[in-house]
Amino acid sequence: MARPFPVLLKSVDLWYTLLWRMCITPVRGGSAGGLGLVGPNWEVQVSKATMLRNVPLFAGLSDQALEDLASSLGRRTFAKGMIIFHKGSPGQTMYVVESGKVRIFTLSETGQEVTLNVYGPGDVFGEFSLLDGLPRSAGAVAMERTVTRTLHRDHFFQHLEASPSMAKSIIEVLTARLRFTTEHAESLAFLDVYGRVAMRLVDLAGRYGTEKDGIELDLHLTQAELATWVAATRESVNKVLGTFRDQGLIAVEGQKITILDLEGLERRIVY
Ligand code: CMP
């Protein structure tokens, strides 16, 4: 279906808010309400564009470029625990997390797992294979119900040619990833297990924490998974968390960790 108002749609967010309230919701609900100008297909286009506006990778794009990009996106939803892809599988697609969380991991031949990172709303993953055409460098698993938008490499390169600002943004994404990996390698080499766990908690608090009597981290990250991220056993992570709890730095309730003293945790990260 052709998109209505292609020229007038300069401020996607404003139109989105107005039209969602005035006519899209009734159309979606199947009632006869609304203006009758828009259909479900356009609803998807606009909500995708609105979502993309909050993705740092696409921050420099014009409204029109963003809309064009939105029309190339697919959508995939993963239930908690579902493997999105395995390391070594062919990959032509990059994923943008719309909601939920994804854990990136590798497995050794003997089944030992290493967690590389956790991504949430606004983050992208799968960009390596999209860029170089090689198999997936790591696996990805949904930590909770996760909705993603997918971008095929052919479309990505088309948009890259049309919008040079995207080249700058993808370089920034890759540089951030390299910096993160360098810091992580340093932490494994120079910090004890207390420092490594503290570093991950401080990092996760900054990215995904919500202020609620402290900084709440409800990531569905098990202690065993956290252990695979800090190169420790589950038992030692459990001991570290117990020590931090006794020291009043954190509170632990099942998989939920609340950071009570962020500065105190930061003081544990001593190189
Ligand atoms: P790709 O290789 O296509 O699929 C696996 C994805 O995991 C990869 O793209 C990146 O998005 C992500 N990834 C790979 N290695 C790392 C790493 N060391 N740190 C963070 N993310 C990674």
Image: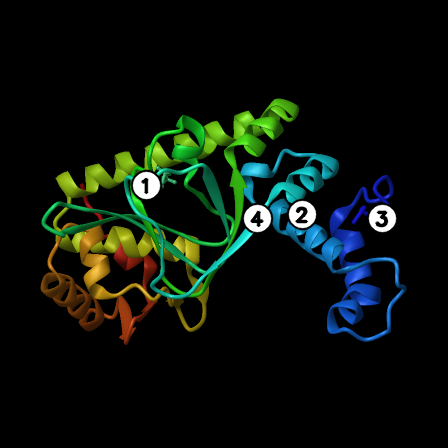
Q: Earlier in the sequence, mark 2 or mark 1?
A: 2
Q: Secondary structure at mark 4?
A: strand
Which residue occupies 10% across, 62% down? 236
Name the kind of residue labelled 4 in the image.
Answer: Gly
Q: Which residue is mark 3?
A: 4
Q: Which residue is mark 1?
A: 89
Report if residue 62 is visible in the image. yes
Cα distance, mark 3 to mark 2?
15 Å
Cα distance, mark 2 to mark 1?
29 Å
Vertically, is 101 above or below 10? Answer: below
- Of the two numbered discs 2 and 4 in the rendering, the one whose residue sits closer to the viewer: 4
Which residue occupies 72% across, 52% down? 46
Q: Are marks 1 and 4 in contact (CB under 8 Å)?
A: no
Residue 196, position as x, y percentages in the image: 20, 50
Cα distance, mark 2 to mark 4?
12 Å
Q: Earlier in the sequence, mark 3 or mark 2?
A: 3
Vertically, is 209 above or below 213? Answer: above
Residue 26, position as x, y percentages in the image: 79, 71
Residue density around tag 4, few if under 14, some if 14–19, many if 20 or more, within 10 Å: some
Which residue occupies 13% across, 63% down? 234
- Of the two numbered discs 2 and 1 in the rendering, the one whose residue sits closer to the viewer: 1
Q: Earlier in the sequence, mark 1 or mark 4?
A: 4
Q: Earlier in the sequence, mark 3 or mark 1?
A: 3
Q: Which residue is mark 4?
A: 74
Q: Which residue is mark 2?
A: 49
Name the kind of residue labelled 2 in the image.
Answer: Ala
Cα distance, mark 1 to mark 4?
19 Å
Name the kind of residue labelled 3 in the image.
Answer: Pro
